[in-house]
Amino acid sequence: MQVSAEDIDIMGEEAIRDPAGYFAPWRESEPVVWAPRCRSWLILNHAHISVALRDPRFSSDRISPFIRRKLSGEGVDPLVRQSFDVLAGWLVFKDGADHARLRGLLSKAFTAKAVASMRERVERLTAELIAAAPQDGVFDLVEQIAVPLPSIVIAEMLGVPTIDRDRFRHWSEMVAPVVSAGLDDPGRYESAAIGMDALVKYFLGLIERYEREPADNLISSLIRARDEDDSLSHAELIATCTLILFGGHETTANLIANSVLALLNHPREMAALRSGAVEPQKAVEEFLRFDGPGKAVVRVVSEDMEFAGKEMKAGQRVFLVLASANHDRQVFTDPDVLRLDREMGRHMAFGWGGHFCMGAPLARLEAAIALPAIVKAFPHLVLDSKPLAWQQVFLTRGLIELPVRAAA
Ligand code: HEM
């Protein structure tokens, strides 16, 4: 049923549980719509999202206007201000030349070779995590496999010593709500600021260490890229480390858990993946499309303009709802059906255009190794309980837990 535009509630129970279904009527009838309850434009169909993601009038910089508006006066907690200054250095929030410069530098460190070199490690880790889970009984797949795999992989790629991993994860979890929930919830700032401060101090120490003794890791490569091309400041180096940490953590964990859930709900597709009848790489593209972890990306209108027949004003916020575009029947046949051998049109799970996800090859590698391994290791896996609880955030889509029952 199509609710009125006034009633669109992006954080409502239905939108959180089934975003593609919730937005379907609007995607078909009025895919660019102003939603007063979240004071934002929503862009819901594939065609308009792919144009908007390449249109420079939709700015990615929503942090510096926020700092100017809310964090520049007297009485602002310096720790909160510092944490937003770090976020302002993330290339995902930059436009134009600054974005291109930082993206170029990161691509020198985060290479296809660096990702490919992780293959064996990902295979070994997956096997270890699977072996540590109960082989006959109930466990939370999020906690036991989906979260630890990408967080250990990214920590190792960055050069974080094993012994520090838990502290590192704790701080990044403190910052995560601000990053994935948007900027509307001041209650989250203080704890995020404490987490970010700890992370920054920790990275400062690691950077100093790898400046003295370079090693084979991403931080050392970023230091080398900075020294070869002195346009990367120290603050940007730290910001980039924190961005990779976030990029590498939660999204891939959510991809693994969302995909296992999709398989539990589609036993035929589960059997096809288990038997090797579908290529894991192909299946991963369908998981990304069907229920990918990146639900929406945000832009800010940089000048008064017309887009898709609508008058947009400078400063207005725009949610480009990737989860909706990925179920657009103009592009995908039977979009609500999970079909692991689908001949894929271009899905939007990693975004599109200049900000296309830089971690896509790593996420694809991890999911293509972990998902077949999980379904093969647990031949009688079933969902243990319903209803499932989804994280109450709009930008990403992930389960709080995925209780499954394995049977010997
Ligand atoms: C399934 C897992 C992942 C998904 C669904 C995902 C999704 C996305 C999306 C939608 C964007 C575009 C944001 C925008 O346009 O505003 C993005 C950007 C980015 N992602 Fe990912 N991501 C994933 C994994 C990763 C991983 C593993 C890393 C790194 C280790 C990473 C690093 C980045 C970076 C650095 C950017 C910024 C690119 C830019 O602004 O030019 N991501 N990601």
Image (spheres, rainbow, N blue to C red):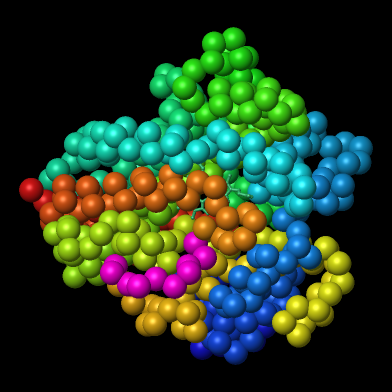
Horizontal side, residue 22 vs residue 269: left or right: right
Towards the viewer: 104 or 136: 104
Q: Which residues are magenta?
A: 340-349
Chief SS of the magenta region:
loop
As drawn, 354 above or below 43: above
Horizontal side, residue 32 vs residue 406: left or right: right
Towards the viewer: 384 or 25: 25
Q: Quadrant of residue 191?
A: top right
As drawn, 113 above or below 356: above
Q: Quadrant of residue 222?
A: top right
Residue placed at 19% from the left, 70% from the top?
268
Residue placed at 39% from the left, 82% from the top?
333
Which x, y percent locates residue 324? 52, 73
Residue 347 sits inside the magenta stretch: yes
Towards the viewer: 112 or 127: 112
- Residue 188 appears in the picture as rendered: no
Which x, y percent locates residue 6? 69, 81
Outermost residue to the front: 228
Horizontal side, residue 78 vs residue 346: left or right: right
